[in-house]
Image (cartoon, grey):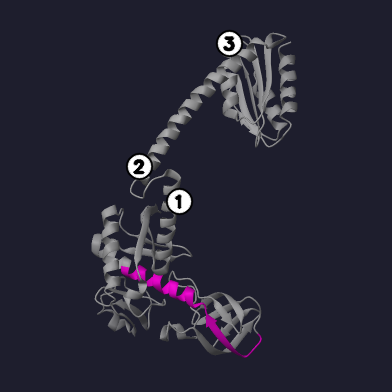
Amino acid sequence: MTERLFWADPYARDFAARVVRRDGSRLVLDRTLFYPTSGGQPNDTGTINGVRVVDVLEEGETIVHVTESPVDAADVKGAIDWNRRLDHMQQHDGQHILSEAFIRVCGAETTSFHLGPETCTIDLSKPSVSAADLETAERLANQVVWENRPIDIAFHTREEIAKLPLRKPPQVDGSIRVVTVRDFDCSACCGTHAKTSGETGVVMVLGVERAKGDPRVTFVCGWRALAYARQNAATIRAAGAKTSASREDLVGAVERIMSESADTRKSLASAEKQLAEHRAKELAASAATRGRARFVVEVFENRDIKYLQGIASQIVASPGLVAVLGATGATSSLVIARSADVAVDVRPIGKDALAAIGGKGGGPANFIQGGGPGANVRDAMKLAEDRLAAALA
């Protein structure tokens, strides 16, 4: 059994201990300040005898420290990463307060909690949470934070637990650790917590999304909230500089740019369609006769398959034509098409041609398309042209 010093004093930063078991880089000490991953809260990090602690695990009543390299001494000194500990206390205190706030505002209980490296989340039991509920719960949580209420921590028996206003009854036997935000929240918890709610700093709700059918609220507290606000401010300033707009006018400026961009895309698409029609007419006019059809064989540099589709469709709209078109770019593209009056199934020929560029595709008997990573699109087109010419000889 490992003595948990972090429960007695979560503000302590270093300690001395004796090694009771060693297995390579896994150490068991008689006492520790290192909190193990549990209850939604990640483990502490730091050093033991100057060697970095990379993980802390809970195995029953024992805490196992995983170090970067073996520590051979019998007596050791440990030091936790205080900034990480403070951050975790701020997030965990904020979670307790915010979870109770959601119960009071809209009757939504917390079903799970995750303390991530950048943000935290709680899943709520209610089918949906409105924007007004989010704002009201956030406001209530911060009111409790700024009132700087005492946070009391004590162990209770099962009989004593029955008399407490616990937010969620614990499913364990024996002595139970209870964390109480004075006159607001009462929860069974094994995590590290501050002395007062004010040390949480601030609770900032970032948004809500659906996870497994229930609302998942993302939030940050304390120094994380300040960092997030700074990042937002920097982003707004940068976007404002790019759009020559103030913060108040930024949304309108973005909407205007998006509208102008949509109009430009429409104009460009119309121009490209007209260009494709013109190019298709040019190619059809110069098509070479091979057997019972006239052939258009052309490679387009740095074009995508949509461009080929448009050209090919225009070409084979006229009778007696076969189009074998290729395009180069990040990948090679291939389109093989024929007019309605040309009696040949392009599918088996197209399949072999696409295989030549390591690609796949598909389509009906008169129009097959696809692409692949191979750079030898011209060889694939030559294969298709010769096979089609033979079929139409």
- What residue span does the magenta drawing correspond to? 72-97
| Along the viewing direction, whichever of 354 and 196 lies nearer the viewer | 196
Instruction: Name which of mark 1 and mark 3 comes first in the sequence.
Output: 1
Find disc 2 in the rendering and name its residue: 252
Crowding at mark 1 (Cα within 10 Å: few <14, some 14-19, many 20+): few
Image coordinates for residue 332, horizontal then vertical, percent: 67, 32
Q: Amino acid at mark 2?
A: Gly
Q: Secondary structure at mark 1?
A: helix
Q: CA distance from mark 2 to mark 1?
A: 16 Å
Tell me which amino acid carries mark 1.
Answer: Ala
The quadrant of the image that shows the C terminus is top right
Residues 264 and 61: in front is 264
Q: Position of residue 63 (x, y in %)?
A: 52, 81
Q: Nearer the viewer, mark 2 or mark 3?
A: 2
Name the residue tied to disc 1.
238
- Find residue 321 and report its image quarter: top right
Position of residue 299 measured from the top left corner of the image (x, y, whole percent):
68, 24
**Does the image show residue 31?**
no
* Residue 318 tag number: 3
Q: Camera-side residue: 113 or 54?
A: 54
Q: Secondary structure at mark 2?
A: helix
> Does the magenta run of residues contain 93?
yes
